[in-house]
Image: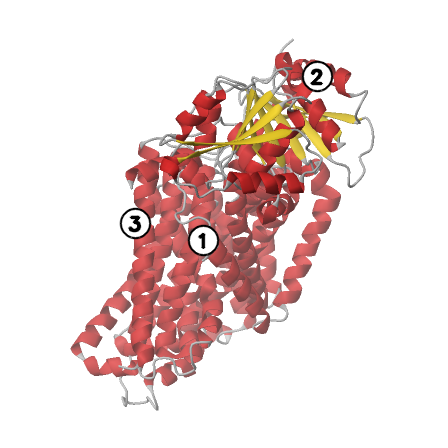
C-alpha cells in the first residue's frame, strides 16, 4: 500500500468514527435534555458536567 | 358591545421523526450523488471520491449541529430566517428568508428537469417517444411542468401527505443505493484484485479534494428542509435535531459505500475498458456512476432510472415544501405581504405561499438555463449555512438564558467556526464553476435589499424577542468622546440608593448620565399593553434626575422587553456606554446562576465597565476592603474604591494566600496602580494573610470595614456554571455593603462591542 492509501484510509475511518461519535453523543444528549426537562444553556451545561 | 370570536388557523403537527428524517434524506440524495460521483472520480481519482464524501459528511454535520441547536430552541417554520432574526434582527433575517426561498425553489426547478430528462431518455430508449420525435426541448419542459404541478398539488394536500409521499420515494432511492453499496463490498471480497482500482489513490494530488468537495457539498443540504418543518413536527425539540443528525449520518455512509462500489464495479482489462478503471469511469462524467453500476449488476439501467426518478421527485417534493415554508414565514412576520401567510382552513397548508413558490419554480424550470441558476442556488445555500453558523454563536451568547434548548452542540464554538471557514472557501470556489451564478445571486440579493428598504422595514411586525424603546428623552446631545455612565433603575423604591455613589463616579469621570428603566413585560401580557408598566419606572427615574441633572448632562430611556438582561446589554451597546451602574438585591433564585438571571448575563456580555452595588445606600465609606488577585478587574476595583472612599478614608488592598503560597505580589500591584492612577490620592494600605480558606478569611476581615469592593470572576461560562466562583460567593455571604466590578478592555470587549 502507498502512503497516500494508508493516510486516506485513516482519514476516512477517522471521519466515519467522528461522525458516529458526534451523532450518538448528540442522540444521548437530546434524550437526556428532554427527559430531564432541561432548557437553558446553563442548566444543560451543568447537567452534562455532572454526568461526566 | 359584542366581540367577534377570534378564530386563527395553525399548521397541524403530523410529521414524525421518520417522516422528517426521510424528507431531509430525500433532499440530499436527489441533489448530487448520481451526478457527482462520476465527476468526483474524474477530478480527484478513486481515493479522492471516497475522501470527498467522508470529509463533506463531517463538514455537513458541523452545520447540521448548528441547525439542530437552533431548531430545537426555535422550532418554528422559517429555518435560517428565524435564526437570523433572533441573531441579527429584521434586515438580515429578511435576506436570509429571501435567499432561502430562492435557493430552495430553484433547486426544485432543477429536480423537475432532472426527472424529465432521465424519464424521457429511458422512454426514448424503449422507442416510446417516436411519435413525438424523441427527446425534445418542448417535451422536456412540458414533462418538468407536469411533475412540478403534481408535487405542488401534493404539497397543497397537507404536511402529512407531503411527508408520507416523500418518505416513500426516499426509501426507494436509499434502498437502491444501499443495495449497490452492499453488492460492491461483496464483489470486492470475492475478487480482491479489484482493490487495485484504488491505485493510484489520488492521481491529481490532495489539493483537488477541495474542488470535488465544493462540487458535491450541495448533496448534503437536506437538514435545511427539516428546519422548515418545525410547526408541523410532533415533539419538535426532540425530533428536529435528531432528524437532522440522522439524515447527515445515513447519507454520508450511503455516499461512501456507493463511491466504493462504483470504483470496484469495473474490472481492469474487461471488454470496453481501456486504461485504469477510474479513468474509464471518470471519462463519462455525470453518467460515470450509471456506467459503472451497469457493470456491477444486471438490469442496472432500469433500476438506475427508477432510482433517479425516486431521487429527483423526493427532492422536488422536499424543496417545494421548504421554499413554501420560507415564504410563509416572511408573510407571517409581514416581511412580505400578509397574504403569504394565509392557511387553508380545510387543508391546513399555506396555499398562497405555495402558489407563489410554484409560479417561481415553473418560470425558472421553463424559461431559464437551469444549471447556472442551480449554481446560484448552491451559492445561496452556502451563504445561508455560513449565516446560520454565525447565528448559532450569536444566539447562544445573547439568548442562551432565555431559550429552551432541546440540543446543544459539544466543543462550542469550534465546529461552527470550522464550518464558517470551509463554507467561505467553497462559496468562493463556485465562481470557477459558473460566472452567471455569481451574477444571478447578487441580483437576487440586491432585489431583496430594495424590497426590504421600501416595503418590509416599515411593515414588519415585532417578534416576542425584540426590545422596544417606549420613551426616550435626551436632555443634551452627547459628544463622541464623552464618558458615558448608564444607571439602570430596576426598582423605583430603591432608586435613590444609587444616587450618591453614581454622583461620585460621574464626578470623577466627568461623564454624562443615561438613566435607563427596563420594563419586563410578562410573557402572558401582550407587548402592546406594556405601557401599563411604565409609570412606576418613570417615577424612579424622575427622582434620580432631581439629584443629578443639576451637575451632569442627563438623558433618560424607558424600554420594555421580555428579558431584562438583554435589554440592558443592548442599550449599553447602542449608546456606547463606558460605565454601567446597577443595584443587586444580594440573592439568587436559581442555582445555575451565580448572582441571578439578570446580573450574570450583564457581567458576561456588556462591553463596558460594570459596577454592581449591594446594600450600598447613601452611606459614608471611611474604610474600604479590596480583596485582590491581580488582573484587570482587581485594578478597576481599586480605582472604584479610590473614588468612593471619603476624603479622609482608607483603602486596604487585601490578599489571602493559601499556606503562604505567594504567587501574587500585592505590593508591586498597588505600586503599579498608583503609577497608573495618580489622581487617586487616598491612602492605600496592603494586608496579606495566610489561610487555607480564602473565602472565610475575606469574610472575617470584612467585618471591620464599611464597604467591600470585589473584582468579578474571569472564569469562562462553563466553569462558572459547574462550580461556584470565589468573588460571587463572597458577594452573597458578606454582611457588609458590597460592590462587584467588571472592567472592560482588551480584545474581548472590543469584539463584543463590534458584534
* A50 is higher (above) or lower (below) than B167: above
Residue A26 relative to residue B700: left or right? left
At a point 38% along the width and 75% down the height, the residue shown is B48
B10 or B455: nearer the eye? Answer: B455
At label 3, counting other C-alpha atoms closer than 10 Å, the crowd grade (few under 14, some 14-19, many 20 or more) is some
* Quarter residue B644 falls in: top right
Between the C-alphas of marks 2 and 1, the distance is: 45 Å
Residue B511 relative to residue B218: left or right? right
Q: Secondary structure at mark 2?
A: helix
Is tag 2's residue or tag 1's residue first in the polypeptide sequence? 1
Residue that numbered label 3 is attached to: A24
Image coordinates for residue B354, horizontal then vertical, percent? 55, 46
Residue B679 relative to residue B252: left or right? right
Image coordinates for residue B193, horizontal then vertical, percent? 21, 83
At a point 65% along the width and 8% down the height, the residue shown is B1
* Quarter residue B198 falls in: bottom left
Chain under disc 3? A
Residue that numbered label 1 is attached to: B414
Residue that numbered label 2 is attached to: B538
Between the C-alphas of marks 2 and 3, the distance is: 53 Å
Image coordinates for residue B240, horizontal then vertical, percent? 40, 43
Amino acid at each position: 500500500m502507498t502512503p497516500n492509501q494508508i493516510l486516506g484510509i485513516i482519514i476516512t475511518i477517522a471521519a466515519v468514527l467522528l461522525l458516529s461519535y458526534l451523532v450518538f453523543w448528540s442522540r444521548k444528549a437530546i434524550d437526556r435534555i428532554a427527559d430531564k426537562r432541561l432548557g437553558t444553556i446553563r442548566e444543560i451545561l451543568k447537567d452534562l458536567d455532572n454526568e461526566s | 358591545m359584542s366581540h367577534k370570536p377570534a378564530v386563527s388557523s395553525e399548521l397541524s403537527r403530523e410529521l414524525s421523526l421518520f417522516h422528517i428524517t426521510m424528507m431531509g434524506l430525500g433532499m440530499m440524495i436527489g441533489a448530487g450523488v448520481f451526478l457527482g460521483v462520476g465527476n468526483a472520480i474524474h477530478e480527484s481519482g478513486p481515493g479522492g471520491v471516497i475522501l470527498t464524501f467522508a470529509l463533506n459528511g463531517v463538514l455537513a454535520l458541523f452545520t447540521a449541529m448548528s441547525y439542530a441547536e437552533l431548531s430545537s430552541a426555535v422550532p418554528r417554520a422559517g429555518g435560517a430566517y428565524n435564526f437570523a432574526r433572533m441573531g441579527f434582527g429584521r434586515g438580515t433575517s429578511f435576506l436570509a428568508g429571501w435567499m432561502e426561498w430562492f435557493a430552495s425553489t430553484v433547486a426544485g426547478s432543477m429536480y423537475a428537469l432532472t426527472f424529465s430528462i432521465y424519464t424521457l431518455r429511458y422512454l426514448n430508449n424503449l422507442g416510446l417517444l417516436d411519435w413525438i420525435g424523441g427527446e425534445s426541448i418542448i417535451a422536456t419542459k412540458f414533462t418538468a411542468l407536469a411533475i412540478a404541478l403534481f408535487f405542488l398539488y401534493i404539497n397543497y394536500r397537507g404536511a402529512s401527505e407531503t411527508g408520507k409521499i416523500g418518505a416513500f420515494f426516499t426509501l426507494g432511492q436509499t434502498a437502491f443505493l444501499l443495495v449497490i453499496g452492499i453488492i460492491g463490498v461483496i464483489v470486492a471480497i470475492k475478487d480482491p484484485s479489484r482493490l487495485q482500482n484504488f491505485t493510484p489513490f489520488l492521481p491529481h494530488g490532495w489539493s483537488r479534494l477541495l474542488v470535488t468537495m465544493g462540487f458535491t457539498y450541495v448533496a448534503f443540504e437536506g437538514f435545511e428542509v427539516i428546519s422548515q418543518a418545525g410547526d408541523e413536527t410532533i415533539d419538535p425539540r426532540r425530533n428536529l435535531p435528531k432528524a437532522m443528525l440522522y439524515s447527515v449520518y445515513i447519507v454520508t455512509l450511503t455516499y461512501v459505500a456507493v463511491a466504493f462500489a462504483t470504483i470496484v464495479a469495473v474490472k481492469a482489462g474487461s471488454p470496453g475498458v481501456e486504461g485504469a478503471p477510474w479513468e474509464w469511469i471518470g471519462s463519462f462524467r455525470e453518467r460515470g456512476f450509471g456506467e459503472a453500476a451497469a457493470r456491477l449488476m444486471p438490469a442496472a439501467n432500469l433500476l438506475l432510472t427508477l432510482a433517479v426518478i425516486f431521487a429527483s421527485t423526493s427532492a422536488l417534493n422536499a424543496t417545494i415544501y421548504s421554499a413554501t415554508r420560507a415564504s410563509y414565514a416572511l408573510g407571517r412576520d409581514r416581511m412580505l405581504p400578509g397574504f403569504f401567510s394565509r392557511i387553508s382552513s380545510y387543508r391546513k397548508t399555506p396555499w398562497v405561499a405555495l402558489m407563489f413558490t410554484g409560479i417561481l419554480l415553473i418560470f425558472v424550470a421553463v424559461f431559464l438555463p437551469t444549471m447556472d441558476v442551480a449554481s446560484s442556488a448552491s451559492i445561496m445555500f452556502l451563504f445561508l449555512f455560513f449565516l446560520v453558523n454565525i447565528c448559532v454563536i450569536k444566539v447562544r451568547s445573547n439568548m442562551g438564558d432565555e431559550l429552551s434548548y432541546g440540543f446543544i452542540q459539544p466543543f462550542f464554538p469550534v465546529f461552527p467556526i470550522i464550518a464558517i471557514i470551509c463554507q467561505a472557501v467553497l462559496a468562493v470556489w463556485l465562481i470557477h464553476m459558473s460566472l452567471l451564478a455569481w451574477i444571478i445571486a447578487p441580483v437576487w440579493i440586491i432585489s431583496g435589499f430594495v424590497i426590504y428598504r421600501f416595503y418590509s422595514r416599515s411593515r414588519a411586525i415585532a417578534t416576542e424577542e425584540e426590545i422596544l424603546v417606549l420613551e426616550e428623552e435626551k436632555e443634551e446631545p452627547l459628544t463622541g468622546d464623552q464618558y458615558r455612565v448608564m444607571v439602570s433603575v430596576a426598582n423605583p423604591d430603591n432608586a435613590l440608593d444609587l444616587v450618591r455613589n453614581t454622583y461620585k463616579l460621574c464626578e470623577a469621570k466627568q461623564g454624562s448620565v443615561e438613566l435607563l428603566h427596563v420594563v419586563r413585560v410578562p410573557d402572558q401580557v401582550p407587548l402592546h399593553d406594556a405601557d401599563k408598566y411604565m409609570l412606576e419606572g418613570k417615577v424612579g427615574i424622575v427622582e434620580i434626575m432631581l439629584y443629578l441633572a443639576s451637575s451632569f448632562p442627563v438623558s433618560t430611556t424607558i424600554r420594555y422587553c421580555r428579558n431584562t438582561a438583554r435589554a440592558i446589554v443592548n442599550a449599553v451597546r447602542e449608546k456606547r456606554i463606558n460605565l454601567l451602574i446597577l443595584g443587586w438585591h444580594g440573592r439568587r433564585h436559581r442555582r445555575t446562576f451565580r448572582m441571578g438571571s439578570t446580573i450574570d448575563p450583564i457581567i458576561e456580555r456588556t462591553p463596558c465597565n460594570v459596577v454592581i452595588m449591594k446594600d450600598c445606600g447613601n452611606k459614608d465609606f471611611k474604610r474600604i476592603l479590596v480583596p485582590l488577585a491581580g488582573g484587570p478587574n482587581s485594578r478597576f476595583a481599586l480605582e472604584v474604591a479610590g473614588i468612593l472612599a471619603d476624603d479622609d478614608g482608607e483603602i486596604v488592598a487585601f490578599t489571602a494566600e493559601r499556606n503562604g503560597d505567594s504567587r501574587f505580589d500585592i505590593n508591586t500591584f498597588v505600586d503599579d496602580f498608583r503609577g497608573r492612577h495618580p489622581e487617586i490620592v487616598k491612602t492605600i494600605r496592603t494586608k496579606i494573610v495566610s489561610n487555607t480558606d480564602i473565602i472565610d478569611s475575606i469574610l472575617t476581615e470584612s467585618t471591620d470595614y464599611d464597604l467591600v469592593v470585589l473584582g468579578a470572576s474571569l472564569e469562562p461560562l462553563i466553569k462558572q456554571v459547574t462550580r461556584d466562583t470565589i468573588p460571587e460567593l463572597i458577594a452573597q455571604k458578606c454582611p457588609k455593603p458590597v460592590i462587584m466590578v467588571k472592567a472592560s478592555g482588551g480584545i474581548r470587549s472590543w469584539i463584543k462591542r463590534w458584534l
